[in-house]
Image (cartoon, coloured by chain):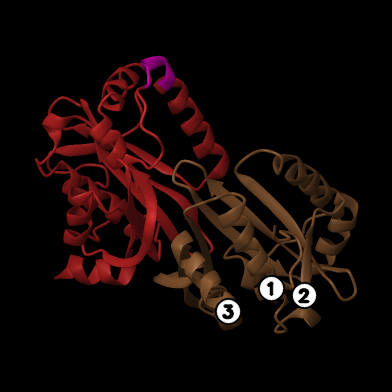
Amino acid sequence: MFDIQTQLFEGQDIRFGPIDHEKDPGIESKWTHDSDFMRMYDIDPARPMSAAMMKKKYEKLEKEIEENKNIYHFAIRAREDDGLIGKASIHRIEWSNGNGWIRLGIGAGDDRRKGYGSQALRMLLRFAFAELNLFRVTAAVQEYNEAGIALLKKAGFVEEVRRRQALDRDGRRWDLLVFGLLNDEWQKQAKA
Amino acid sequence: MRDLFRGELVRLTTEEPDAYAKMEVQWQKDTEFHSLMDGDPATVVSEKKLKEWFEKRNESSLKPGRHAFSIRALAEDKLIGFFGLWVDLIHSEAWVGIGIGEREFWNKGYGTDAMKLCLQYAFTELNVHRVSLGLMDYNPRALRSYEKAGFRLEGRTRGDVQRAGKHHDSLWMGILHEEWLQMQNREKQ
């Protein structure tokens, strides 16, 4: 795990790669037409996006990455055919404090519940802690996102904050949870 | 109708960018004040740049979602601080940032009085469901003031602020509209 030869971007079934501006917009456009996915991935209002809109979004994202230097974004691809299956990112990195926010989504329904999310999270944490050398990472997750909560807990995250009734969805209020994992905790876990 | 812009110790204003930039130039010299306000590194900004920011801020306050106020002490009609409300219109939540830059007005109830006006504005004029804020664990004075204003501690993110070589926790607080109403009713009785 701490070996310098370890390939950071290669997992068992998946790999982290850059955005493919030709192929990816059409695939992610399909994901945005799945409101379940959109409401798990984001707290902004869900809305379908065209491939052209996605393309612009990618360009904006890459510009932000270049200018702000506080975002790392990965396309999650299947090792067998390099097809896009999700996205993972560390954003709002505060270098002086050693904190960053992580985000992860597996886009297509068929690709969920296959362990890709767990693998991607493991790779993302290794990158955050052993490459960026962050002190901690933070993740926000909606009270109704049971798969997300289970994934974070399995990776050793601790529930730190419960922002009561912070979300309004489906005609009721929900809590927004904030989870954290320290570099120390991750290292102990990795060694065990 | 209640006066939205006048409390017991302070009143709320929008200052001219010139006057405000002059104050902020003084306040930014105080790095302890900065570290109480923010988790970012302290820095210095020119009066010209500050003036541009306030011009922009005053303009954006006319749109829904952003509401910035200056705080004046009633006694000397002195500009002592500011607060801003950033509203998530979709989920009906407002985030507050508040600061009293003038040190001689610390610890005397001015911040708490301004926060009362801030919550009154958020809940009766902006009509949000909840108001949120964050602070650092090395600011117990702010914690007491926010608790007095009705905020509840909702958790702490461990070690996410590093100051003077040490990791500190951020504290997260929130108050719901119904909690604020109950508090108003209790105070009336």
User: In front of the other: label 3 or label 1?
Assistant: 1
Name which residue type carries label 1.
Asp
Residue farthest toward the left in the current orientation of the protein: A114
Q: Which mark is residue B95?
A: none
* Rendered position, B189 above or below A120: below
| Secondary structure found at label 2 | loop
> Residue B43 appears at what percent x and percent y?
71, 62
Q: Residue at x 28, y 55 (%)?
A: A126
Residue A38 lies in the magenta-colored region: no
Q: CA distance from mark 2 to mark 1?
A: 6 Å
Q: Earlier in the sequence, mark 2 or mark 3?
A: 2
* Colour in which chain B is drawn: brown
Residue bearing mark 2: B9
Residue bearing mark 3: B139
Q: Is residue B103 left or right of residue B125?
A: right
Q: Label 1: how many residues lie within 10 Å, few (<14), some (14-19) or many (20+)?
A: some
Q: Label 3: how many residues lie within 10 Å, few (<14), some (14-19) or many (20+)?
A: some
* Colour in which chain A is drawn: red
User: In front of the other: label 2 or label 3?
Assistant: 2
Task: Determine whether label 2 and label 1 are within 8 Å by CB.
Answer: yes
**Chain at tag 1:** B
**Chain at tag 3:** B
Name which residue type carries label 3.
Asn
The magenta segment is A49-53
User: Which SS type dominates the magenta stretch?
Assistant: helix
Name which residue type carries label 2.
Leu
Q: Earlier in the sequence, mark 2 or mark 1?
A: 2
Q: Nearer the viewer, residue B129 or A157?
A: B129
Residue bearing mark 1: B113
